């Protein structure tokens, strides 16, 4: 089926179930909004086969407009809200997009396409307008994965890919229930937000509470008012929430009691003190509204102590792994059994994996195959030759290893692996995982750099204002002792500025390295 048919299926099963929670719009009425928007877009000139851009934060008009484009037989170009106008122009040229539905704040003068105010009120519905008979092999969305300059990688995802992802999410059925609520503040233009904040609710007949900001105060207010059952977020935000909770409890001089109860709750329950345990944990869980049962992390690895914190509070915490090319999550962790730290899980649904060319540590390249894997980059023969083998396996470019539970662990991106002069490989993620544990370190980037003609693993640390170079040097030296000597980071820089990140809070290593070369980071240990 295509995406509009997937929506119709939900209407048949759950017509009265609220889909847009904040707006109190059920699935049946949502379809009415889609048809009205389709009428407006048709009258504006959109027709079957057109590529139509969507440039918006998480407004209700975002999903309404997407479905309207599909209703008319078009393809949705998902546009990142953090780019420059020249990039949007270039993306439109590459994809032959002549029409972009955007918030007015994004409008700019351009000859390449026409803007449409996504918040336009749709005045009427043409009841004679019928959904275009899209095939499941038709392209549903286009996304850029490597910028818009040079030879970009444009990912076309078919309706078959998207619906297959929806089907594979059935893996989460023990936590996701029809009629319950997903909190959707991750950007829908990004594959993580698209999959968990859009496809998952569609599959399970759940509501989505859209939030267009990542302001913690606005998010906390939503938790208190709406009490969502499922909350997805990037690891950085889970760390921030955890830190705020602990700081709040410490301010009341009760952290010693809360931490004791969290760490010894099994024993306390056996002693008949279950009511005390529940009372304390419920007070903490009330930060998320009191009904949160499932927390989802993706986009990067989550620290073990962060995952442990939330599971001790009695909430399931799962981590997923995926890419734009895989429609988001193709692997998901299993929180109900003892896991090895930093695991992002095992394959979901029909996804197959292979780990090829393993080194002596068992680290190798991850290749995947399955129905939700895309068919190849648009108009990029060379990239497709490098990314696919003759049997249809796709090379993710990610280095992983597999533990005794069958779950995968991220070791780093192939292009970020540091190859020393000795020929040994150093994986930045391993070192960053060590250094982020240092008190006072907010974030860290480790990358390949040259010092006096020698290739080294170099670190740039973003730190709290009270951190000194002496304290940091001592802490880094101590952390280095946990790994082989050839992996040690002995050259690094320190800054109190935040490191540049993507929309999902991944550090932009190439930007950090360039800033280092340009002299931005002057407080150095070399």
Image: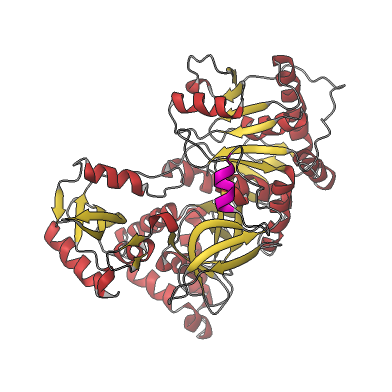
Q: Nearer the viewer, residue 427 or 44?
A: 427
Q: In this picture, which residue range is highlighted in magenta?
A: 380-387
Quadrant location, the C terminus: bottom left
Q: Nearer the viewer, residue 266 or 88?
A: 88
Q: Position of residue 108 (x, y in %)?
A: 48, 17
Q: Is residue 109 left or right of residue 459?
A: right
Residue drawn at (25%, 74%) of the image: 485
Q: Is residue 22 left or right of residue 218?
A: right
Q: Position of residue 70 (x, y in %)?
A: 73, 33
Number of numbered labels in the structure image = 0
The quarter of the picture where residue 521 lies is top left
Residue drawn at (37%, 49%) of the image: 507
The quarter of the picture where residue 239 lies is bottom left
Quadrant location, the N terminus: top right
Q: Position of residue 388 (x, y in %)?
A: 61, 54
Q: Is residue 118 visible?
A: no
Q: Nearer the viewer, residue 57 or 340?
A: 340
Q: Is residue 349 left or right of residue 187?
A: right
Asked if the stretch drawn in magenta spans residue 279, the answer is no
Residue drawn at (61%, 32%) of the image: 77
Q: Is residue 143 visible?
A: yes
* Residue 263 drawn above or below residue 133: below
Q: Position of residue 257 (x, y in %)?
A: 36, 72
* Residue 104 drawn above or below residue 317: above
* Residue 453 drawn above or below residue 153: below
């Amino acid at each position: 089926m295509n995406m509009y048919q997937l929506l119709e299926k939900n209407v048949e099963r759950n017509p009265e179930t609220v889909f847009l929670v904040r707006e109190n719009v059920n699935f049946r009425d949502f379809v009415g909004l889609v048809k009205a928007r389709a009428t407006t877009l048709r009258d504006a000139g959109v027709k079957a086969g057109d590529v139509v851009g969507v440039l918006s934060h998480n407004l209700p008009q975002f999903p309404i407009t997407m479905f309207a484009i599909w209703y008319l037989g078009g393809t949705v170009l998902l546009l990142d809200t953090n780019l420059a106008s020249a990039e949007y122009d270039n993306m439109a040229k590459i994809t032959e997009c002549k029409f972009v539905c955007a918030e007015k704040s994004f409008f700019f003068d351009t000859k390449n396409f026409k803007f449409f105010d996504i918040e336009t009120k749709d005045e009427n519905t043409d009841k004679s307008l019928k959904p275009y008979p899209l095939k499941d092999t038709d392209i549903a969305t286009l996304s850029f994965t490597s910028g818009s300059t040079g030879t970009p990688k444009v990912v076309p995802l078919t309706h078959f890919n998207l619906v297959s992802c929806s089907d594979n999410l059935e893996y989460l059925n023990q936590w996701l229930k029809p009629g319950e609520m997903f909190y959707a503040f991750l950007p829908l233009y990004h594959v993580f937000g698209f999959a968990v904040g859009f496809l998952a609710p569609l599959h399970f007949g759940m509501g989505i509470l859209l939030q267009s900001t990542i302001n913690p105060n606005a998010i906390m207010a939503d938790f208190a008012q709406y009490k969502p059952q499922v909350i997805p977020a990037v690891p950085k935000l889970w760390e921030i929430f955890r830190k705020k909770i602990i700081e709040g409890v410490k301010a009341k001089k009760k952290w010693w009691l809360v931490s004791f109860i969290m760490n010894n709750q099994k024993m306390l329950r056996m002693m008949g003190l279950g009511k005390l345990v529940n009372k304390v944990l419920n007070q903490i869980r009330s930060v998320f509204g009191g009904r949160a049962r499932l927390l989802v992390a993706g986009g990067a690895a989550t620290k073990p102590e962060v995952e442990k914190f939330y599971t001790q509070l009695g909430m399931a915490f799962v981590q997923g792994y995926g890419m734009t090319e895989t429609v988001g999550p193709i692997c998901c962790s299993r929180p109900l059994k003892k896991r090895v730290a930093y695991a992002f899980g095992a394959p979901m649904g029909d996804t197959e994996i292979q780990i090829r060319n393993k080194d002596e540590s068992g680290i190798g390249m991850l290749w995947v195959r399955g129905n939700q894997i895309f068919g190849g980059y648009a108009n990029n023969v060379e990239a497709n030759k490098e990314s696919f083998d003759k049997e249809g396996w796709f090379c993710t470019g990610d280095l992983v290893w597999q533990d005794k539970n069958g779950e995968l662990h991220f070791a780093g991106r192939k292009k970020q692996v540091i190859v020393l002069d000795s020929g040994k490989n150093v994986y930045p993620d391993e070192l960053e995982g060590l250094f982020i544990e240092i008190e006072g370190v907010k974030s860290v980037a480790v990358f390949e750099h040259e010092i006096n003609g020698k290739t080294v693993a170099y670190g740039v640390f973003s730190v709290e204002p009270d951190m000194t170079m002496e304290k940091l040097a001592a802490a880094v030296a101590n952390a280095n002792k946990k790994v082989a000597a050839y992996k040690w980071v002995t050259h690094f820089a320190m800054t109190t500025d935040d490191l540049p990140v993507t929309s999902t809070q991944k550090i932009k290593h190439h930007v950090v390295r360039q800033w280092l070369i340009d002299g931005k980071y002057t407080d150095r240990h070399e």
